[in-house]
């Protein structure tokens, strides 16, 4: 299955992507994760992307599209994938359509995680990420592990630079301006399905898998 996850920052895309990709046996491709790995690795791409990410702005379309083109050309994405955080602008969505058409294929489904701004702010403000394995955690909503240490790999849990209050506010503005128009774009293709992304993580996963089961 070729699937895109959309939704505002903090909607739970990364959290759900992990479960859904495992369930579908497809690679999870997160442009945010790829960009952060480049920042950590100090690559040229990372150096360019960092100033946009720290400000809560989008990295230029061309940079991200080239990155995704290269990733989708890898053998593990041949039979399906789950895109998390891409596309994020209408030009990115158009580029993805073209890229897939050139490969003789297309998207099966765009799953929208619907959640309001207040909940998004609570989720982002308390988010922690594992430096070792990338596991996502929340200081208030996850009581499963001691604060500061990952229960999967004992790695350090850190707060993302772009989860500061002023950056969160800008990311929400950028979402409304640049990414929300994608809902109309995909709505017109008939491939968009929205699910309620509030409530416990497992309940949201269940709703997502219920939608996906009708496409398998
Ligand atoms: P990216 O990493 O994609 O950030 P984002 O879209 O802002 O999404 P987030 O990762 O913040 O949130 P999420 O929806 O994945 O939520 P999560 O599961 O972590 O992008 C970062 C930056 O990179 C961008 O600002 C941009 O600069 C650049 N970039 C990336 N892609 C780009 C592109 N295509 N074009 C241009 N630039 C690009 O959950 C959040 C928190 O909530 C966690 O703590 C989690 O534990 C908790 N949580 C999740 N679900 C629940 C639940 N059901 N109940 C309670 N808590 C929950
Ligand atoms: Zn870990």
Image (cartoon, rainbow, N blue to C red):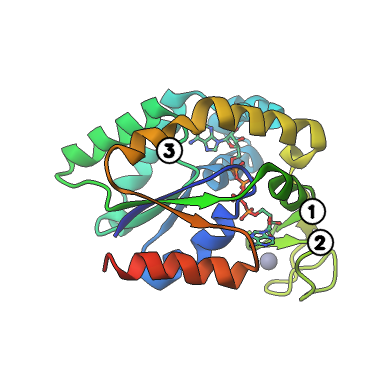
Near-viewer residue (109 or 39): 109
Whole-angstrom CA distance, mark 3 to mark 1, is 27 Å
Label 1 residue SS? loop
Q: Residue at x 18, y 39 (%)?
A: 101
Q: Is residue 67 visible?
A: no
Task: Say whether disc 3 or disc 2 marks the residue closer to the N-terminus.
Answer: 2
Assess disc 3: are there few (<14), some (14-19) or many (≥20) residues with their C-alpha within 10 Å of its C-alpha.
some
Q: Quadrant of residue 208?
A: bottom left
Residue at 52% in and 52% down: 113
Per the rendering, the mark at residue 126 is 1
- Name the foreground residue: 83 vs 9: 9
- Which one is nearer the viewer's eye here, 39 or 171? 171
Instruction: Mark 2 and mark 1 in contact? Answer it, CB < 8 Å.
Output: yes
Estimate how packed mark 2 is, as few (under 14), some (14 to 19) or many (20 or more) residues with alpha carbons within 10 Å.
some
Q: Nearer the viewer, residue 196 or 142?
A: 196
Q: Which residue is mark 2?
A: 139
Circle 1 crowding by C-alpha within 10 Å: few under 14, some 14–19, many from 20 = some
Ligand 1 within 8 Å of disc 1? The answer is yes
In-image side of 53 versus 74 (left or right): right
Where's residue 60, x and y in %? 50, 23
Nearest to N terminus: mark 3 or mark 1: 1
C-alpha separation, residue under disc 2 versus residue under disc 1? 5 Å
Camera-nearest label, 3 or 1: 3
Location of the C terminus by quadrant is bottom left
Earlier-in-chain disc, 2 versus 1: 1
Q: Is mark 2 within 8 Å of ligand 1?
A: yes
Residue at 31% across / 30% down in the picture? Answer: 94
Query: Residue beneath label 3, please?
Result: 183
* Residue 122 visible here: yes
């Amino acid at each position: 299955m070729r699937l895109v996850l959309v939704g505002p920052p903090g909607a739970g895309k990364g959290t759900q992507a992990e479960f859904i990709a495992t369930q579908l046996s497809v690679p999870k491709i997160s442009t945010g994760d790829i960009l952060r790995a480049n920042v950590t690795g100090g690559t040229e791409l990372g150096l360019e992307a960092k100033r946009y990410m720290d400000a809560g702005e989008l990295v230029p379309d061309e940079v991200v599209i080239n990155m995704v083109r290269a990733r989708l050309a890898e053998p593990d994405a041949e039979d399906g994938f789950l895109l998390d955080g891409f596309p994020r602008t209408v030009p990115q969505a158009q580029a993805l359509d073209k890229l897939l058409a050139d490969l003789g294929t297309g998207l099966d489904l765009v799953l929208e995680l619907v959640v309001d701004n207040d909940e998004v702010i609570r989720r982002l403000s308390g988010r922690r990420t594992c430096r070792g394995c990338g596991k996502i955690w929340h200081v208030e909503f996850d009581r499963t592990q001691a604060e500061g240490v990952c229960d999967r790999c004992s790695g350090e849990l850190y707060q993302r630079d772009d989860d500061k209050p002023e950056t969160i506010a800008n990311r929400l503005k950028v979402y409304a301006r640049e990414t929300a128009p994608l809902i109309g774009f995909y709505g017109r293709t008939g491939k968009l399905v929205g699910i309620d992304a509030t409530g416990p993580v497992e309940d949201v996963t269940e709703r997502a898998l219920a939608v996906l089961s009708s496409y398998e």
